[in-house]
Image (cartoon, rainbow, N blue to C red):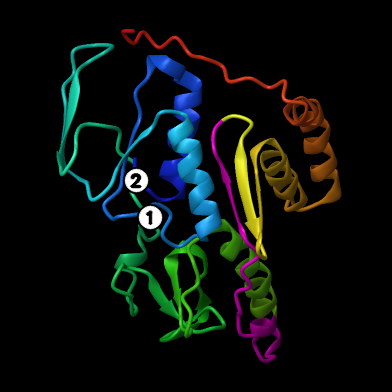
Amino acid sequence: MGGGPSGVELACKIKDRFGPRGEVKLIERGDKLLKTFSSALRRASVRALTRRGIEICYRTEIRESFWGWAGVGAAGAIALSGGSGGLGSGGQRSAIGCGELPCKHSEDGRVQVQSTFQVADYPEVLVLGDGAEIASRHRTPATAQAAYQQASVAAKNLQALMEGKPLKSFRYLHLGDMLTLGIGDGVLDSFGVTLTGRVAASLRRLIYVQRLPTWPHRLQVLRKLAPDLVAQLAGRSQPQILNAGLSS
């Protein structure tokens, strides 16, 4: 798995699920994990990986993968440069089909848009999220947090277009970062404050509940989550070890 947020989260979750019956390696092309995140969040993530016995392979990349098919439990292999075998989790790519649109693109295939999300040659078309490269001095990260902020501005700009009013420029406000680090564990870093462990994992879930569109949605989900959140904060939630037929 790669050393970005998806790889780190998935590595911890898989290791918690399989326990000693599974071997997990994190394969990172560079010399550090989570390059775009704060140093405090990176340190917390490395500690969580090390505590679970997950091997981190720096300066390593996947060259080829070979997968045979002989029924359940078919053998496979991954060829690496600079390391040994492990699971693979790719990085981000531009949205499907964006690279084929008849407009200007960035080097990684994103559609180049103005700060109002308008496509340069098609001002009636707005593009946002992972598929957009916004004209700005500071690049907007391809994260859910950024897309969430973009959505409200894009909706207001669509209405402004229909009413012939001026459009607003988007400005990204970084509110912090959150990661799950296994079952009942996490890290939250915001405005210089870093929380880890069960408290961070619970706050992360509550923040996602707050982002749901309406209060009925929030209350419905919160009722479902409440028993698990109480157990998690009390330290009673334990990883479920899966029996996947792996040899001991």
Which quarter of the figure has residue 122?
bottom left
Which kind of residue does numbered mark 1 sit on?
A: Gln
How far apart marks 1 and 2 lie (CA) works out to: 11 Å
Q: Looking at the picture, does residue 26 appear above or below residue 31?
A: above
Q: Nearer the viewer, residue 100 or 138?
A: 138
In the rendered structure, the answer to whether residue 108 lies left or right of residue 203 reads left
Location of mark 1 (residue): 92
Q: Quadrant of the N terminus?
A: top left
Q: Estimate how packed mark 1 is, as few (under 14), some (14 to 19) or many (20 or more) residues with alpha carbons within 10 Å.
A: few
Residue 186 inside the magenta-drawn segment: no
Q: Residue 48 at x, y = what percent?
A: 50, 37
Magenta-tinted stretch: 160-182
Label 1 sits on a secondary structure element that is loop
The picture places residue 234, in percent across and down from the top left corner, at: 78, 26
Q: Which residue is mark 2?
A: 2
Which residue is painted at 64% across and 67% down in the image?
Answer: 149
Dot 1 or dot 2: first in sequence order is: 2
Across and down, in percent, residue 226 comes to: 81, 31
Q: How many marks?
A: 2
**Image quarter (top left, top right, bottom left or bottom right) of the C terminus:** top left
